[in-house]
Image (spheres, grey):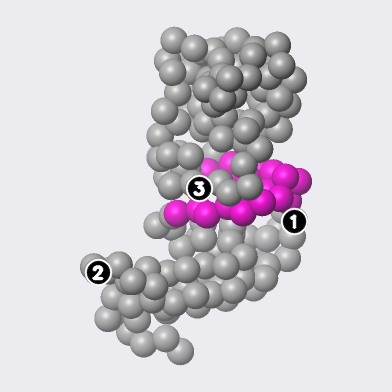
């Protein structure tokens, strides 16, 4: 999943989600249930016929996520998919992604420049150094589940830990 939704502008949400299945040779009839299910999982039931121009930025990202999920991958690579969204939409999609990940399982590799996003989403955080890019630190995250996750003191502590390690990698301070 890319930073931009990369949807076909002339195609409906359902047609955009159907694309990877069509490329695998799965017929529209055989794929219809999976497409509807993927759109429902991302909260877009009822928007199957909407074209990208008729959807908000967050909804377009949800279509992109549904398209990534419809083929039921064991590994999902997400390259800053929420970076261009407003904070409220970004938080909502992060919470939705966590819920989907718990339901579906598999592995998600999520690339972000946001310390807060990494702390909220990750179980394992791999921090990269500046050029040349190398692994600067690995941090295991174990935050409580639920809607108050961002308010938990463990979240604030994890943000502080990530910040210290990034500062050390950039040569501004040493980790405590």
Location of residue 12 by image quarter: top right
Q: Residue furthest front?
A: 25
Which residue is disc 1 drawn over?
146
- Residue in the picture at 71% in, 33% down: 41
Between residues 19 and 153, which one lies in front from this camera angle?
Answer: 19
Q: Is residue 53 located in the magenta-colored stretch of the structure?
A: no
Which is closer to the viewer, label 3 or label 1?
3
Residue 65 location, x and y as percent? 57, 35
Cβ atoms under marks 1 and 2 closer than 8 Å:
no
- The answer, for residue 22, to whether it is visible in the render is yes
The residue pinned by badge 3 equals 77
What residue is drawn where x is 41% and y is 28%? 6
- Residue 26 position, x and y percent, is 63, 19
The kind of secondary structure element at disc 3 is strand
Q: Measured from the top left, where is residue 113 in percent x and y?
A: 40, 57
Residue 167 seen from this side: no
Mark 2 element type: loop
Please provide the residue range marked out in magenta: 90-111
């Amino acid at each position: 999943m890319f930073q931009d939704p990369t949807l076909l502008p002339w195609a409906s949400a359902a047609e955009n989600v159907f694309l990877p299945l069509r490329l695998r040779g799965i017929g529209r009839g055989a794929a219809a249930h999976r497409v509807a299910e993927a759109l429902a999982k991302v909260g877009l039931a009822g928007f199957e016929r909407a074209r990208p121009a008729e959807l908000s930025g967050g909804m377009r990202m949800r279509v992109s996520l549904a398209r990534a999920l419809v083929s039921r991958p064991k590994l999902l690579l997400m390259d800053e998919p929420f970076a261009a969204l407003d904070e409220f939409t970004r938080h909502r999609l992060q919470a939705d992604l966590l819920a989907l990940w718990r339901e579906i399982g598999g592995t998600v590799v999520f690339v972000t420049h946001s310390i807060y996003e990494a702390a909220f989403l990750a179980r394992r955080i791999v921090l990269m150094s500046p050029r040349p890019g190398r692994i600067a630190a690995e941090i295991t995250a174990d935050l409580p589940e639920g809607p108050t996750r961002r308010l938990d003191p463990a979240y604030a502590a994890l943000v502080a830990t990530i910040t210290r390690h990034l500062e050390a990698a950039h040569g501004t301070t040493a980790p405590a």
